[in-house]
Amino acid sequence: MTLTVSNLSVLRASRHLLSGVGFEVSAGQALILRGPNGLGKTTLLRTIAGLQPVHEGQVDMPEDMAVYAGHLDGIKSTLTVRENLEFWASVFGTGSIDAAIAVFDMDQLIDRPGGMLSAGQKRRLGLARLMVTGRPIWLLDEPTVSLDTVAVGQFGDMIAGHLDRGGIAVIATHIDLGLGARAETLDLSQFKAAPEQQFNPNEAFL
Amino acid sequence: MNALLLRDMRLAMRAGGGFGLSLAFFLIVVVLVPFGVGPEMGLLSKIAPGILWVGALLACLLSLDRIFALDFEDGTLDLLATAPLPLEAVVSVKSFAHWITTGLPLVLAAPVLGVLLGLQSDAFYWIVLSLLLGTPALSVIGTFGAALTVGLKRGGLLLSLLVLPLYVPTLIFGAELARRGIVGMDVGTPMSLLLGITFASIALLPFASAAVLKINLR
Amino acid sequence: MSLWEYANPVKFLSFSGKIVPWFAAGAALFIAVGLYWGYFLTPDDYKQGSTVKIIYLHVPAALIAINAWFMMLVASLIWLIRRHHVSALAARAAAPIGIVMTLITLITGALWGQPMWGTWWAWDPRLTSFLILFLFYLGYVALWAAIDNPDTAADLTSVLCMVGSIFAVMSRYAVLFWNQGLHQGASLSLDKEKNVADVFYQPLLMSITGFVLLFVALVLIGTRTEIRIRRASALLARERG
């Protein structure tokens, strides 16, 4: 299984951000995306996830294999940690939530409502959700925001475990996750759309 | 799909979910009408089907923005859109959950409020029947409006402006069914037309709702 | 050389710039002649007196009010299928004209209804349908105004226009069923017997032609304005880098 992106253009709100993005990630590998704020990392990930239409180029991967985790964790404040996870487990048709709880040591929090969690705890829950989806391609946007050093370490282990099981991860982050040789780094600045391309959708009006 | 339905209902029932708000609103609307038109029971019972229908419609309207707004704000919609469920199914399930937590209670409360408006007990049957057949359409049509305005800040007023004209046929046939039933006229035509609207909305509108939701998510 | 070439905004601007004056002049001529002829050169109706002459405003406005929505539906479909910006902008430009025409229809109708039916307003199916049409127009315009991203706005309003069309037709029949009404039948129909008498018919036809030309001219002007706004924002954005 591979995730192949070729010659992809990325648009946000009719603004051309990136063009000609191409990479390939195969099973057991991670790709770290870098680039300054506003470059289009989030939009690129959302495009790969299918949340934004592909304007130009191609995203090739087996169908229904990717899962996306963005800035928002999708946690319901009136549902407990267990209920939040069980909901996603049944939506994705996977059974157990034990592994997900174990990753970040959340046994203590299991019956606490989502609204009572701190920002870091929410993020841990949001990332733990990835475990219950059972999908092999993870698309993660700044996953370590508001995590403490311990949790970042746990997260690194979680990614490593995922890669060991033949998974794929595409991560936009500036933190070293300690993945060693299994992670490749891609600087997106090289794909920044040239100024004359930047206003593509409105260019018809000029 | 069951998981989503259960979750939506659970969210509506728990604190801050707004369950019961529509019901209270329905009660207040119905209580206010006699203050406006006078306490004469003969007049009130004559316009009762219309009041109950308009009241139920407004109460339904009040809770529409909850269908998607909260899930949009906390990022759940993004995650649902990439989940194995097709978005059309998500939309349908959410309409259904809205109907169970809003429409159905309104249907059940209508006879009780009918008492306040001087309705006789044999009229209850027609009120409940017409609302039972019509409120699902209100939920489904409202879901479309909610999907249209989900990305907008302060979209509530716009939502009403968009949805209310779409409610016209349902309201006309629903209230007409109740009115004709109560006075013992033939109800075949309004009943079949109301059913037609309800079933056609349930069958077709989720596709439109899912399409606009996709547009709003990108 | 296909018709779609005019969907290019730049081509559209130069082409429409040439034809707008003709449409505008034609509209002015036909409306002026039609109204003068209708108001001053036709006899009073034997039943309705001079009030009947409101039809020279009422009927054309009503025709445009309905067909403007129909045009918006076609333009919306073209936008959704072929993604031509001009099409979406033309739909947007037509909506305010539709609103004004609906208002003219309702107001002239009320002015006529007062002496004829003895009331400014009746919940007659035709009147009610136009009122509902007015609400649909309001919603459509409000949705355009509420969304920042122009492409998203075009997409959403197009879907609303499609769904709204279906519900507008349903409302029309629902209202017919709800109240059989006292409005007379259509003034124009293919069935010759039912037509208005010829003396009234010819100036009415002129007036209708004038209104159609006026509608086309206004939509073209409105679309040109929308295109220029988009051009301006594109240029501003480029300026800022």
Image: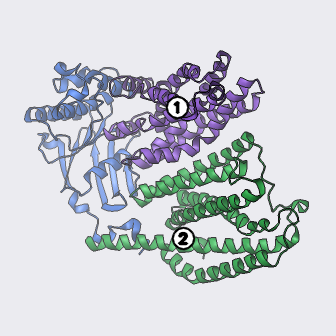
Residue C46: where, in percent of width, then height?
88, 65
The amino acid at mark 1 is: Phe
Q: Is residue B156 left or right of residue C167?
A: left
Residue A148 position (above or below residue C150): above
Can the viewer see residue B96 in this picture? no
Q: Chain letter for purple?
A: B
Q: CA distance from mark 1 to mark 2?
A: 58 Å
Q: Chain letter for blue?
A: A
Q: Residue at x 52, y 70 (%)?
A: C223
> Which subunit holds the residue at mark 1?
B
Residue C215: where, in percent of width, then height?
63, 70
- Between C61 and A17, the one lying in front of the other is C61
Q: Chain letter for green?
A: C
- Between C66 and C233, the one lying in front of the other is C66
Residue C19: where, in percent of width, then height?
60, 81
- Between C46 and C38, the one lying in front of the other is C46
| Residue at image mark 2 | C7
Q: Secondary structure at mark 1?
A: helix
> Which subunit holds the residue at mark 2?
C
Q: Residue at x 32, y 29 (%)?
A: A134
What colour scheme has been applied to the protein in the rendered image?
Answer: by chain
Q: Residues within 10 Å of mark 1 (few under 14, many from 20)?
A: few
Q: Is residue A33 left or right of residue B4?
A: left
Q: Secondary structure at mark 2?
A: helix
| Residue at image mark 1 | B35
Residue A156: where, in percent of width, then height?
15, 35
